Image (cartoon, grey):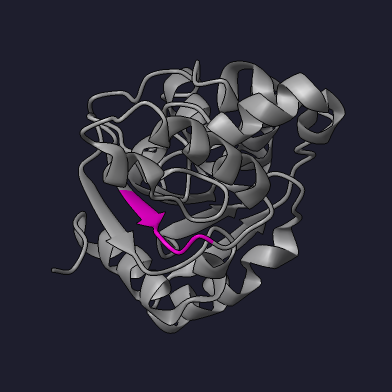
């Protein structure tokens, strides 16, 4: 008998699968079957982590059963790589939370100063060179605009540089969630994009973020 659509939750850099548990519990309350997928974000690069996600699915999931994918930050880039290189899976909907789809300025600074802090996650991922989104993939993007997080030191420095340039779009350029700029979350190929008053990590425990994630997984659009 076919099981319910399963939502695979993929954490971000420096995290483990348990951090996705609050979101998983709320998605389960919305009638979704979830699995918190763990991977080595520092030691392995995006290609290896995509391969291992594929191998896990081959062992635990029938290819005829549709799956949803939800990724936080770097986890969203793994989704991008995975759906491009492993098109055999029946992907229904994808949601990314605070994912820097066009690359991360914060990660750029860290890579130049302390590359060990971002490890193998920078190349082909946080550097903005992740695989393009296939046309058939329905992707919903959730971005935060509450500037609280460990990346503030680098982003505040970068914002000071931007203010000296007198950019007419300066206000929009300065908005971030404490780690990722709002502009970095935008992807032309995405199906929908929504901004919420949450920080980069805070979005994982926010009730409204969970509701919007569930709504997109069920309907292919965010609730307006």
Viewer-closest of 48 and 89: 48
Q: Is residue 105 left or right of residue 46?
A: left
Q: Give the farthest residue toward the bottom.
A: 29
Viewer-closest of 202 and 62: 202
Compared to 2, does 103 lie above or below?
Answer: above
Q: Is residue 146 magenta?
A: yes
Q: Is residue 139 left or right of residue 207?
A: left
Q: How many marks?
A: 0
Q: Quadrant of residue 22?
A: bottom right
Where residue 80 appears, x then y in whole percent?
A: 46, 30
Where residue 96 appears, x then y in whole percent?
A: 43, 48
Q: Quadrant of residue 9?
A: bottom right
Q: Give the farthest residue toward the left.
A: 224
State the quadrant of the N terminus.
Answer: bottom left
Compared to 102, does 194 lie above or below?
Answer: below
Q: Quadrant of residue 174?
A: top left
Viewer-closest of 50 and 64: 50
Q: Is residue 102 visible?
A: yes
Q: Is residue 126 left or right of residue 111?
A: left
Q: Is residue 19 left or right of residue 217?
A: right
Where residue 111 appears, x then y in whole percent?
A: 73, 24
Compared to 7, does 204 lie above or below?
Answer: below
State the quadrant of the C terminus.
Answer: bottom left
- Residue drawn at x 23%, y 36% as measured from the top left: 169
Viewer-closest of 120 and 111: 111
- Residue drawn at x 34%, y 65% as measured from the top left: 196
Q: Magenta segment range?
A: 141-147
Where residue 197 appears, x then y in whole percent?
A: 38, 69
Q: Is residue 121 visible?
A: no
Q: Is residue 218 magenta?
A: no
- Residue drawn at x 44%, y 84% as measured from the top left: 29
């Amino acid at each position: 008998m076919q099981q319910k659509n399963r939502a695979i939750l993929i954490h971000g850099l420096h995290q483990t699968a348990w951090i996705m548990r609050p979101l998983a519990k709320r998605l389960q309350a919305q009638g979704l079957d979830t699995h918190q997928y763990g991977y080595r974000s520092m030691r392995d690069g995006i290609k290896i982590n995509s391969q291992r996600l594929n191998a896990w699915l081959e062992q635990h999931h029938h290819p005829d059963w549709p799956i949803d994918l939800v990724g936080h930050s770097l986890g969203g880039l793994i989704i991008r790589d995975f759906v491009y290189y492993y098109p055999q899976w029946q992907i229904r909907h994808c949601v990314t939370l605070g994912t820097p789809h066009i690359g991360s300025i914060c990660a750029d600074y860290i890579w130049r100063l302390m590359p060990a802090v971002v490890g193998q996650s920078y190349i082909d991922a946080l550097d903005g060179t992740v695989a393009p989104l296939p046309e058939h993939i329905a992707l919903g993007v959730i971005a935060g605009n509450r500037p609280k997080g460990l990346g503030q030191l680098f982003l505040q420095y970068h914002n000071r540089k931007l203010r000296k340039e007198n950019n007419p779009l300066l206000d929009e350029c300065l908005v971030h969630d404490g780690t990722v700029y709002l502009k970095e979350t935008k992807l032309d190929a995405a199906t929908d994009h929504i901004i919420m008053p949450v920080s980069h990590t805070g979005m994982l425990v926010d009730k409204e973020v969970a509701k919007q994630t569930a709504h997109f997984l069920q309907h292919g659009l965010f609730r307006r």
